[in-house]
Amino acid sequence: MKFLKNIFAAIGLLCVSGLFIFATQEVPSDAPQDNTIEKEAKLINDYNIYALSVPDALDFAGEAMPLDNPDILERMDRELLVNTYWQSNGLLMFKRAEKYFPIIEPILKANNIPDDFKYLAVIESGLTNAVSPAGARGVWQIMKTTGRENGLEINSNVDERYHLEMATQVACKYLKKAKDKLGSWTLAAAAYNAGNAGVSRRLKEQGVANYYDLLLGEETGRYLFRIVALKEILNHPKKYGFNFTEKDLYTSVPTYKIEVDSAVTDFSKFAKQFGINYKILKIHNPWLREKHLNNKTKKQYVIEIPKEGFYSVNP
């Protein structure tokens, strides 16, 4: 008890000391007074938050979203709000889309995959070579097993999940199989997140036939709504308050391709042969994971080299 009394006494002393210090501080003469704050003129560009109107009709890959269902409407509203008011991330999506959609779009088209699936890549990785806690990698967030099953080379030396064109082809294969199995592009997209078996099992357990009738976990439950929200925002920037010009967007650096069918002992020296450095080589070939290429099987690799004049490289 004596110990507690000492503690309370110390606290009391600190409080008294604090009050004394604050009481003796001088208030600056130009500090705003309570009775004048409300009279201050508001800034012309004062920041405001507005509720958003969910469009009357939205779809994914031509499959309509049932917005007359109040649950669906609320979930769509949430994703539009979250992605509209995360402004810095939104602007980055506009910038990166200008750089990477021209690579993704023709591959989707050649594989008869709806163009809307490019927005799936946006929510999977933010169009970056992300690494998930589960081990998925690259713009399309492909797991090691899935990549290898679909022909990608994945090891410590080379990881083709980071090769955008190759990874997009793998995503197309997976989505085709999912559509054939599950019957709709919406369910195929959900299966990209939860797996074909997982979605099939839940459809059977719950006795329903489409994504919007399923009770799912947080991530997969938000998945389609996030895709459609990004599709809507990226297609109507002004409507959602995003302002930029064409020069603000990222663009691809033109490259040419060289073929390599032998080992490369040092990519730093290799890069200098083409007037670039190792960092620039890796920017354009992120699938090369080490400073050397083993290539014991004499496999033919295609390496991209940026055209001259786009980088300033010191000798």
Image (cartoon, rainbow, N blue to C red):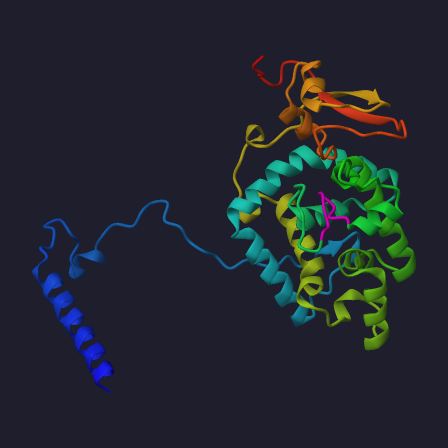
Q: Give the range drawn in magenta.
A: 135-142
Q: Is residue 112 left or right of residue 162?
A: right
Residue 60 to residue 251: above or below: below
Q: How many labels does the image show?
A: 0
Residue at the limit of the structure toward the bottom, as seen here: 1
At 87% across and 38% down in the image, what residue appears? 110
| Image quadrant in which you'd find residue 82 | bottom right
Residue 308, x across and y down, in percent: 67, 14
Residue at the limit of the structure toward the front, as seen here: 2
The answer to whether residue 131 is seen in the rendering is: yes
- Between 96 and 164, the one lying in front of the other is 164
Residue 258 to residue 7: above or below: above
- Between 7 and 188, the one lying in front of the other is 7
Residue 153, x across and y down, in percent: 83, 39
Residue 196 to residue 237: above or below: below
Residue 208, x across and y down, in percent: 83, 73
- Between 15 and 54, the one lying in front of the other is 15
| Image quadrant in which you'd find residue 17 | bottom left
Q: Is residue 97 left or right of residue 208?
A: left
At 17% across and 77% down in the image, what residue appears? 9
Residue 81, x across and y down, in percent: 55, 57
Q: Is residue 270 left or right of residue 172?
A: left
Q: Does the magenta stretch include residue 136?
A: yes
Q: Quadrant of the C terminus?
A: top right
At 67% across and 27% down in the image, what residue appears? 252
Classified by dominant secondary structure, the portion drawn in magenta counts as loop
Q: In this view, does 220 lie to the left or right of 302?
A: left
The answer to whether residue 231 is seen in the rendering is: no
Q: Is residue 146 magenta?
A: no
| Image quadrant in which you'd find residue 1 | bottom left
